[in-house]
Image: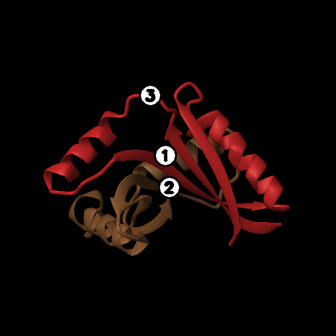
Chain colours: A brown, B red
Amino acid sequence: MTAFTATVTVRLKRGVLDPEAETTQRSLERLGFELADLRSADVFELDLDAEDAEDAADRAEEMAERLLANPTIHDYDVAVAEQ
Amino acid sequence: MTAFTATVTVRLKRGVLDPEAETTQRSLERLGFELADLRSADVFELDLDAEDAEDAADRAEEMAERLLANPTIHDYDVAVAEQ
């Protein structure tokens, strides 16, 4: 078994309203910054032991499907790196 | 001017308690997943026009310093890519 870190990034699907991102963008603009757009995402870094990177990615994807992301409103991607 | 996307990742500093991550880890373990650790982070993807990648990174860093991160409890990093 090898120690991997799987990084799961959970984003709102295009078209889903993101009031937090809108507020953040407006606050930055009020501070004088110019922005074309701002999107927010949640990242989960999972340390886990797995046979290989594929096994680690499969398990991280299952965790995303079952708990970390809500498939109705979220897209997610998984990246795996050996520790 | 070129369009860039700056990705600002904001993490809690080591040692700062993260009850949301702990709860998420425990929920995953209750579902049968084995994890050594789970850390959460916030990501902001900023679309902005800048002279070059260095200029875009400088501005994203200033936004992190002034609003996106709280330097008392957060570390952040900035990655820039051309759109």
B54 lies left or right of A45? right
Where is residue A3 shown, x and y percent of the image?
A: 42, 57
Where is residue A65 shown, x and y percent of the image?
A: 25, 67
Q: Is residue A70 visible?
A: no
* Marks 2 & 1 on one chain: yes
B61 lies left or right of A62? right
**Where residue B16 is drawn, which disc sits there?**
3
Find numbered disc 2 in the image and state the secondary structure of the residue it sits on: loop
B65 lies left or right of A73? right
Where is residue B47 shown, x and y percent of the image?
A: 64, 61
Q: How many residues crowd mark 2 within 10 Å: few (<14), some (14–19), many (20+)?
A: few
Tag 2 near tag 1, CB within 8 Å: no
Q: Is residue A51 above or below residue B71?
A: below
Q: Is residue A20 above or below residue A64?
A: above
- The answer to which of B12 and B54 lies nearer the viewer is B12
- The answer to which of B80 and A30 lies nearer the viewer is B80
Q: Callout 2, which amino acid?
A: Gln
Q: CA distance from mark 1 to mark 3?
A: 26 Å
Residue at the spot of label 2: A83
Q: CA distance from mark 3 to mark 2?
A: 22 Å
Quadrant into which the C terminus of chain B falls: bottom right
Q: Callout 1, which amino acid?
A: Thr
Find numbered disc 3 in the image and state the secondary structure of the residue it sits on: loop
